[in-house]
Image (cartoon, helix red, strand yellow):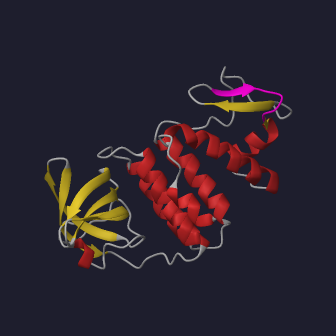
């Protein structure tokens, strides 16, 4: 993995491929994630023949601005892929789809670069996949301006261990006798992951993400079925 401070000797920038789709006969329209530019769209001429333009392969790229889309002038691998397989691979596609849905093009998110790279490495490691996903979902929501305040309710009062709360977008946590237990919300805020916290976090994060998905289901979720 490459830090945001590292640079290619030839002036290329580090990047990850988030999405690709065919364009004309041999080219691609691609979405890349760069630490200093965020999510950008680019045309990769002849890209369908370039094995470097594969998911989860860290890249070096050279981009030229040209209207709405950049032109990819050069691409090469900058290291080995993290080795995602099976359910971990599906999780990787899910992470990339969330990035596509929540991040606007040409909106820089340098603080998201380390968590994104860490998430891909964690998916290939020994950390429970659901815990890795929940951590990334919370980080992505925070970066996109929709973070969960896991220590206080909508009125700024500390969450109570014995309280029950529902999540309301644009407001926060509101008391609700059928809501999430306060002690589990506080445990989630402390990054504590027992079974009850994991089950609650899955439901909570799905509810928190839903308003930002444009009313369209995530295609990557179908892979888990």
Horizontal placement of 34 versus 188: left or right? left
Give residue 225's position: percent from left, percent from top: 64, 65
Residue sitting at x 28%, y 69%: 60
Q: Reply yes or no: does residue 77 show up in magenta.
A: no
Asked if residue 190 can be seen in this view, the reply is: no
Horizontal placement of 123 versus 167: left or right? left
Residue 81 vertical position relative to residue 149 in the rendered view, above or below: below
Give residue 79's position: percent from left, percent from top: 37, 77
Residue sitting at x 33%, y 60%: 5
Residue sitting at x 61%, y 71%: 87
Q: Which residues are magenta?
A: 172-179
Classify residue 43 by image quadrant.
bottom left
Can you name the residue that lies furthest to the right here?
Answer: 162
Classify residue 165 by image quadrant.
top right
Most foreground residue, 3 or 81: 81
Most foreground residue, 68 or 3: 68
Q: Reply yes or no: does residue 173 show up in magenta.
A: yes
């Amino acid at each position: 993995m490459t830090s945001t401070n590292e640079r290619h000797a030839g002036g290329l920038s580090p990047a990850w491929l988030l999405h690709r789709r065919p364009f004309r006969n041999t080219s691609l329209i691609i979405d890349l994630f760069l630490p200093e530019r965020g999510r950008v769209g680019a045309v990769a001429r002849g890209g369908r023949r370039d094995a470097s333009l594969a998911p989860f392969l860290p890249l070096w790229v050279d981009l030229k601005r040209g209207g709405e889309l950049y032109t990819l002038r050069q691409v090469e691998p900058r290291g080995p892929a993290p080795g995602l397989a099976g359910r971990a691979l599906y999780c990787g596609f899910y992470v990339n789809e969330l990035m596509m849905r929540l991040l606007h093009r040409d909106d820089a998110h340098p603080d998201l670069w380390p968590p994104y790279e860490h998430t891909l490495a964690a998916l290939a490691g020994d950390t429970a996949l659901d815990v890795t996903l929940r951590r990334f979902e919370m980080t992505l929501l925070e970066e996109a301006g929709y973070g969960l305040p896991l220590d206080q309710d909508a009125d700024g009062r500390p969450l109570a261990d014995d309280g029950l709360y529902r999540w309301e977008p644009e407001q926060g946590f509101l008391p609700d006798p059928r809501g999430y237990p306060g002690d589990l919300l506080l445990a989630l805020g402390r990054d504590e992951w027992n079974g009850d916290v994991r089950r609650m976090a899955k439901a909570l994060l799905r509810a928190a993400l839903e308003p930002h998905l444009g009313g369209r289901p995530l295609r990557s979720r179908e892979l888990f079925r």
